[in-house]
């Protein structure tokens, strides 16, 4: 990650919670501790944040607690070609009349452009996805009650939701912070709590993850690979990651970003 982008992420993270630690910033940016400490020192000297023991805090304290992970605005432009190719394939899985769940994220958000002419029942905790579908399509849109977290553009509640517990879905489309032999990884406990409830309401779990997510790691396991029906990724996926999914019995779908062609490997 380039220095300018790291600084954007660090400032957004500091603004989203009372104090952000060096360890958290290393996890979010994928950078070393030494790099993060240098960044914090530079931003402190520039008067953009305040360096504290073990981390940093915003000059102006946040009005609302935030979530762990990079802000939506930062993630949106990262690996955008891969995300668009992955999302197109995911949208092609959706047939008119089906109930689906789409979780909040920048890859899943790219699905909306291909859903505008469909007639689906869509449950989403993404404020951004809901807004586009409401204003530009005839899809039925259901959202949970809760707090809108502006940085990630999602709606979450620590108390769960009655609507979510009664919504059945043929498929749930979900992004992630990382994916490994342990399963899907997320960075924030509230996100895990919310998504676990939604996963239980879907027959199939479809993961949208560009190939960089196979190298990313986070501190929380959302679910094991045995719960995943399919992973849609891009042609940068490594052989060892293909083998990992094959061993777990997960279907792998590879999007070709050059021409959006669908290459599918069926894993027994």
Image (cartoon, helix red, strand yellow):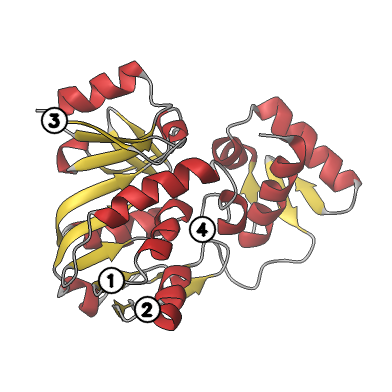
Q: Residue furthest left?
A: 268
Q: Quadrant of the N terminus?
A: top right
In this picture, residue 226 sits left or right of residue 64 = left
Residue located at (56% from left, 53% from top): 76
Residue located at (26% from left, 64% from top): 101
Which mark is first along the chain, 2 or 3?
Answer: 2
- Label 4 crowd bin: few (<14), some (14–19), many (20+), radius 10 Å: many
In this picture, residue 221 sits left or right of residue 49 = left
Vertical placement of residue 170 versus 242, above or below: below
Which residue is denoted by mark 1 in the rendering? 118
How much space separates mark 1 and mark 2, taking CA atoms? 8 Å
User: Residue 137: which disc?
Assistant: 2
Q: Position of residue 73 (x, y in %)?
A: 61, 57
Asked if the residue under mark 4 is in contact with the one under mark 2, i.e. CB atoms within 8 Å, the reply is no
Report the mark closest to the observer, 1 or 3: 1
Vertical placement of residue 102 versus 175, above or below: below
Between residues 117 and 23, which one lies in front from this camera angle?
Answer: 117
Which mark is first along the chain, 4 or 2?
Answer: 4
Which residue is denoted by mark 4 in the rendering? 67
Asked if the residue under mark 2 is in contact with the one under mark 3, i.e. CB atoms within 8 Å, the reply is no
Question: Can residue 246 be seen from the camera position used here?
Answer: yes
Which residue is denoted by mark 3 in the rendering? 249
Asked if the residue under mark 2 is in contact with the one under mark 1, i.e. CB atoms within 8 Å, the reply is yes
Helix, strand or loop under label 1:
loop
Which mark is first along the chain, 4 or 1?
Answer: 4
- Label 2 crowd bin: few (<14), some (14–19), many (20+), radius 10 Å: some
């Amino acid at each position: 990650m380039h220095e300018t982008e790291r600084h954007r992420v660090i400032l957004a993270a500091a603004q989203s919670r009372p104090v952000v630690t060096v360890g958290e910033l290393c996890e979010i940016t994928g950078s070393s501790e030494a790099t993060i400490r240098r960044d914090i020192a530079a931003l402190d000297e520039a008067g953009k944040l305040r360096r504290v023991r073990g981390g940093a805090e915003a000059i102006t304290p946040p009005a609302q607690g935030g979530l762990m992970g990079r802000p939506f605005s930062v993630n949106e432009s990262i690996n955008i070609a891969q995300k668009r190719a992955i999302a197109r394939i995911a949208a092609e899985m959706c047939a008119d009349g089906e109930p689906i769940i789409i979780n909040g994220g920048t890859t899943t958000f790219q699905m909306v452009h291909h859903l505008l002419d469909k007639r689906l029942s869509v449950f989403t905790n993404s404020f951004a996805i809901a807004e586009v579908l409401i204003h530009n399509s005839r899809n039925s849109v259901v959202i949970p009650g809760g707090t809108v977290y502006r940085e990630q553009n999602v709606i979450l509640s620590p108390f769960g939701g009655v609507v979510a517990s009664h919504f059945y879905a043929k498929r749930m489309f979900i992004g992630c912070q990382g994916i490994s032999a342990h399963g899907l990884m997320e960075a924030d406990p509230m996100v895990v709590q919310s998504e676990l409830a939604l996963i239980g309401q879907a027959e199939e779990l479809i993961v949208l993850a560009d190939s960089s997510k196979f190298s990313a790691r986070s501190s929380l396991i959302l679910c094991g690979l045995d719960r995943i029906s399919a992973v849609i990724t891009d042609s940068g996926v490594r052989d060892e990651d293909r083998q990992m999914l094959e061993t777990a019995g997960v279907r792998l779908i590879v999007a070709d970003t050059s021409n959006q062609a669908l290459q599918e490997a069926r894993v027994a």
